[in-house]
Image: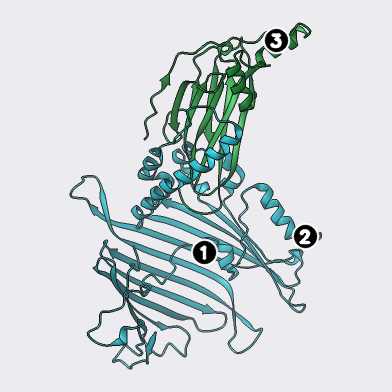
Chain colours: A green, B cyan
Amino acid sequence: MAKKQTARKRRLTKTRRTKTRKTKTPRTKARAAARALPETPVMRAAAEELQLPEAEIRPADGPVTVEIMFGHAQHGKYTLELFDPTGRTSLWSEGGVNTDSTPDRYTLDPTPAALLQHIVVWLGVVNAFTAAPGQQYSIVFEISQNGVIVPGGRTVKKGALNGTQAFYGAVRLVTS
Amino acid sequence: MTTWACRRAVGALACLSVLWPAGAAAGAGQDPPVTGKPVKLVTLDLAVPDSPAFTMLGLSPESVTRPNTPRDLATTILNGVDRRGNLQTGIALDMAPRFLFGGDTLTYQQYSGDGLTRFLARTQVSLAATKGASEADKAVRLAFGVRATLWDRGDPRMDEGLVDCLNNLEIRGPTRVLSPEEQEDWVVKETARLRTKADDCRAAQRERVWNASGFSVGVAPSWNSTTGESSDFDFDGAGVWASLALALSVENGNRPGERVGYGQFVVQGRYRNKERVPVKDQAGQFFEQETAGLGVRLLLGSSTRAAVIEADVARQTPKDLEPTTAYKLSLGGQLRLSTGVWISFAVGGSGGGPAAASKAAFVLSSFKWAMSREPAIR
C-alpha cells in the first residue's frame, strides 16, 4: 500500500481585494468584491490569463473540503494542491492513491473567507489494470462545505481509457 | 515447409506426418535456422468462450459491438430491430453490465472489498442473432450468453505487485497553475510518459500470473424462429461450459512465504444439446445431436524448458443414431538451447469419431518441430 505523500504546508499569504464601484448595488458590490481579481497588476494579469472555472463557496460557512473519486475500479494516483490567487505560489499539497484505505478527502485549513480567489488544482493519472481494449475511466472532483457540494464544485472527467490517462483540473474559489 | 508422406507404424501409430521447418533439409552439418516460428504447443481451447452466444451460433463476427454506455447499448439494439420488433440483421453484442450501467461509480475499494461486486464485474453478457441470407430461408436464430468468473487468482486488480507498481509511478506536476490550453498539453505529455511505465507494470503482472488458478462458467441458450417473426421463437438448445485452472507451485527456498510457479493444470467440461449439424453431401439437410466433452491440459515448465500434454474426449449423440466418442492427444515441449535459440516440438494424434474413422484406434496426425528465437510459450 502506498504511503501518502508528505504534505507540504506553507503559510497562507493574505491578499487584498479590489474596491467595488460606487454605482453598484450592495449585493452586486459584494459579488464583485468576491469575484474581483487580485489587486496588484502582476496578480491581476496572472488571474486573467488563467481563465479558470469557478466554485462558489460561502465565506461564513464551514470548512472547505475537497475530494477525488475514481470510477470503473481503475487505479488512480493524484495530487491536490492549493495555490494563491495568482496561481504561482503553492500553499498546500497532498497526494495519494485510491487503492489504500485512506479516504481521498481533505479539509483545507484556511477559513473559507481566506480561501476566496485561491485556486485548487487536482491532477494525476488513471491507469487501467489490464491492457484490454474498450475500457473506460471516470474521475469526479468535488468541493463541499458541511457535506454539501458547492455550486460549480463538482467536475467530472470521463471517457475511453487506453491504458493510461493523465488528468488536470483547476478551480478558482469565489463567493456567490 | 516440406511434408513427408504418412508412414505406417506398428500398432496404434497409423500415420505419421513429419513437418520439417523451412531449411531444415538443407543438409547435415549446417546450423539449424532460427528465424522460424515456434511450434504451437497449446492447441486446445480449454477456456470458457468470452462470448458464449457467438459460440452457440457458430459466429466469428467481424464487428462485435461492445457498448461502453447505456446509450450505446440502446442505439445498437434499436438499429437491429425493425418497427415490428423483428431482428433486421446480425447482432453481436458483448458487454459487462456492472461496468456498463454502474461503472462510473464503481470504486476500487468496492471492487477489492466486496466479493459480490467482483463477481458481477467479472460477468460478461453476450447477445447474438443471425438471419437467413435468402428469401427461402427467413429463419432467425438468437442466442444469449453469460460468462462468469467465479474464482480468479490472476485478477490484475487484486495483484499487490501491480498495485504497488502503479502506486509508485511519479507524477510530475507543474509548479504553477496552468491555463486551460497548457493543461491540455500537460495531459498529453504526461499521459505518454506515464503510459510507458504503466505498460511495464502491466507486462510484469502478466508474467507473474501466467499459471494463475481460476474457475469460469458459461451458459448460452438459443432460440430459433423459422418464419423470422419475433412471435415464433422456439427454444433451440443450449450450451454450457466450465473451466478450472489450478496453478502448480512450490515454496521459494530463498524467500519464505513466496511460491514459485512451475506449471498449470486445466480441465474443461462442455455440453451442448440440439446442435444442428449439416448432413454430409446433402445441402440444406441437418440432423440434431448432443455433444459432451472433457479436455485437460498439463503444462510444466520453467524459464528455459517446458512440456505440455493435452487430451480431449468428446462424445456425440446424434438423434436416432449411434453415439460416437472421439479423442485427441498431443504432447509438446520446448527447450532453450542458448540465448535467443529455442527448439520446440509437438506430436499430436486423434482417434474414434464417426464410424468410418473409428476403425483406427489412434492416428498420429502430426509431428512438428522448429527452431526459433522466441519460445512457443512463456
Quadrant for the C terminus of chain A, please.
top right
Q: What residue does disc 1 label?
A: B240
In three-dimensional space, the C-alpha distance between marks 1 and 2, rounded to whole angstroms, equals 29 Å
Q: Which mark is residue B85?
A: 2
Q: Residue furthest left?
A: B253
- Looking at marks 1 and 2 on the same chain, the residue that comes earlier in the sequence is marked by 2
- Say above or below: B1 vs B149: below
Drawn side of residue B330 relative to residue B75, left or right: left
Q: Amino acid at mark 1?
A: Val
| Coordinates of residue B30 in the picture (x, y in percent) | 25, 83
- Say above or below: B376 vs A138: below
Q: Secondary structure at mark 3?
A: helix
In three-dimensional space, the C-alpha distance between marks 3 and 2, rounded to whole angstroms, equals 60 Å
Q: What residue does disc 3 label?
A: A30
Task: Report the mark closest to the observer, 1 or 2.
Answer: 2
- Say above or below: B340 vs B314: above
